Image (cartoon, grey):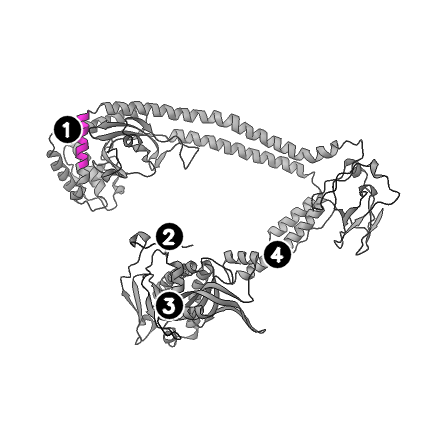
Amino acid sequence: MIVKCEKCEIAFQLDEGRIKPKGTKLRCSKCGHEFKVYPPLNAESPQTVEMTPPQPLVRAEVKPPSQKQKDKPVPVKKTDKPVLIKDTEPPIERGAAPKTKKSRYVSFKTKLMKFAATLILFIAFIVIPIEAYRPWQELYQMIDCADNMVGSVQAAFSPSDLAKMNSFALSSAENKDDRPFSDMDDSPIYSAVAFNMILENDRLPSEKEVVKILEYQDKFKDKFDYSILETLYRYWEEKLEEEPGLKEILKEAKRTLVKAKENAKAADFRLNQIMIMLDSGKKTGLFKDTILYVLDSARWWREAPACIGEVYEFQNNEFWRELALNGESGYGHNPVVDPDNWYLPRFDVDEYGTWFSVWFTCATDKHFNTFSIDFNADRVKQALMLVFRTVAGISIILVIVVTVIANWFSGMVTKPITELTKGAKEVAKGNYDYVVPVLQEDELGQFTIQFNEMTRGQKERLNLLETLEKFLSKELAEIAAKDGLTLGGESIDCTVMFTDFAGFSTITQHLKAGEVVEALNTYFDAMIPIIKKYGGFPDKYIGDAIVAIFGAPVHLSDHAERSVLASIEMQNKMREINETRRRDKKPYFEMRIGLNSGNVIAGAIGCDMKLEYTAIGETTNLANRMESACQIGHVMMAAGTYTKTKTIFFPGVHIPITPEPVHVKGYNDPVSGYRIYVDNMSVSKNMNAKSFESFYVYEKKDHQIKQSPEEIQGSGYTSVAKFR
């Protein structure tokens, strides 16, 4: 059957068997016109053909023709172009079994998914349980061994001896500030070494002996000072003399812990430390977020020991205190599931290895003592990691196998896929002008058409983005490309920024033209990216001044906050630039910044010869006046900006809550201005200066810079601004 397009009148051959009795919609491949054709009057009665119910016209939803039809294609003239039939599934003759079609279409997915599922099930139900069983079994065996050891260590201490040790630990903690050198950073380690030296040596070794055998001198922040150690040694001797019998109790306790550690080492059970801790059982006072060290098994010359009465601060391991806080005695250990690494137990990792803690908590007098053992769990961790490496290895094999199968099946894919692949590669290289040829009239042909349309659309979008990114940040450029811009004029709530270099004219009159241009370009190269980073639109340059708009032409709900953050970062950046230019003996400037928020009239203003997007109105004028009233090196904002940001805390600056009256031209009464001090520096101009190097006068001032909202009582802040 010969069919002609109603619009371009191109003729092509069409199989009559594919035309439905009630008509079938077609699309011309040349001009894209859609029209409807009907079967000829002498066509076979529709009762002899099974027809599926009519479906909506949807692109790329057409199913492939039956095998019978494919085996006997309709001849097409070379001058005719193929036409995609936009209709439902093609008719199937009665008695014809569509097994070949179903098998060819489904077999690829079915075989691939079955193969992948088989490998995944093999990993999940065979490899993981077998490999994971052994390290977990070993971990629990080590926990049982540590339970026995910590229980035997605890049994070696009498309650009366523990009570005396606890009392001394509490006294040491409460009187810590009375200890010599208590304000030094290295005080805890000196104190611990001196205290443990008394328990293990019975004498103070000479400086030469200490320096020779002390293995961790790098732990001291400052250079090791033997005189500090000697002073603290005498201090602890006096303290122990005040408690009759306590020194011998502590010595015996130290020997017990050291001996237990050596026995564990001999049994190939490597320990980090055996520690005795003190807890009140209540989260109050000294024990609110900490417990106290009483004693440990560290040899003073081999590893940094703990000092009696030193606090232990919890860092995500408060589970140590669970028994004591519940008033119970018993055994405990680290969680076997780490919240941060669900596939591993809760290990403690340091420079010496991977450790797992086991402890026994017992009530002593009015307190609780926790006997803790940290045993080496490197072997367990390595075994567990091996499990996941095995899984990862099998997963890689799975990917390789699936890739090989995919490559094998790729030989069965038709030429349109190859052409689409070439097109995808060209687009990936950035060649958006590449057009994939449409080779056939099935769903792959329609997909090729959509691919070409997508490429053209992407090219147009990228061109638009490149243009917009010259004026806006990447974030706002993408929003503008998606939602569009309003350039024809609108009344919009936004924030206007004015910047100006103080004393620019005075300084530049003594400079060469090249020096002035170089300096301005340096500053602008640094300031404009910051404005765009916070969503601002650099409106214009007015000599050495910058005018920027936040909230137009792209609408932003938080434009005031963004403008304040940008102003702070710009002044901080000025400090960096000026420091470099002073060092290089180049001219430098100091800047003022003024802000105001409110309604403006924004749009493209000008004439046919020149258009410029800008914002005009009272808000803009007042922002300019704020800049004029601003202190050099800082920021001044009007009440419009302050009102929108007063509940936001800006770290690293100080914003007085009391407004400052500013006399502004055109206003009968003073307007309210709010200063933003970005540092504790005051900058003024020396009009009698002979060169730029002495033009600015810098003085230290206490501007009460705040780093956190807690420094301001009753501030009412609801959020903290974060620099992007």
- Mark pair 4, 1: CA separation: 85 Å
| Residue depicted at 77% across the width and 37% down the height | 66
Instruction: Identify the image quadrant of residue 512.
Output: bottom left
In terms of sequence position, does the residue under pointer 3 or pointer 1 come before the other?
Answer: 1
Mark 3 residue type? Arg
Mark 4 residue type? Lys
Tell me whether circle 3 and circle 1 mark residues in contact (CB < 8 Å): no
- Mark pair 3, 1: CA separation: 71 Å
Q: Is residue 168 magenta?
A: yes
- Mark pair 4, 3: CA separation: 42 Å
- Camera-side residue of 339 and 588: 339
Instruction: Identify the image quadrant of residue 380.
Output: top left
- Mark pair 2, 1: CA separation: 58 Å
Q: Which residue is mark 1?
A: 248
In the image, which is nearer the foreground, mark 4 or mark 3? Answer: 3
In terms of sequence position, does the residue under pointer 2 or pointer 4 come before the other?
Answer: 4
Tag of residue 718: 2
In terms of sequence position, does the residue under pointer 2 or pointer 1 come before the other?
Answer: 1
Q: Which residue is mark 3?
A: 592
Location of residue 6 in the rendering, given as x and y in whole percent from the top left corner? 80, 54
In terms of sequence position, does the residue under pointer 2 or pointer 3 come before the other?
Answer: 3
Image quarter of the C terminus = bottom left
| Residue depicted at 14% across the width and 30% down the height | 246
Magenta: predominant secondary structure element? Answer: helix
Q: Is residue 554 magenta?
A: no
Tag of residue 459: 4
Tell me whether circle 2 and circle 3 mark residues in contact (CB < 8 Å): no
Which segment did they paint magenta? 158-170
Circle 3 crowding by C-alpha within 10 Å: few under 14, some 14–19, many from 20: many
Mark 1 residue type? Glu
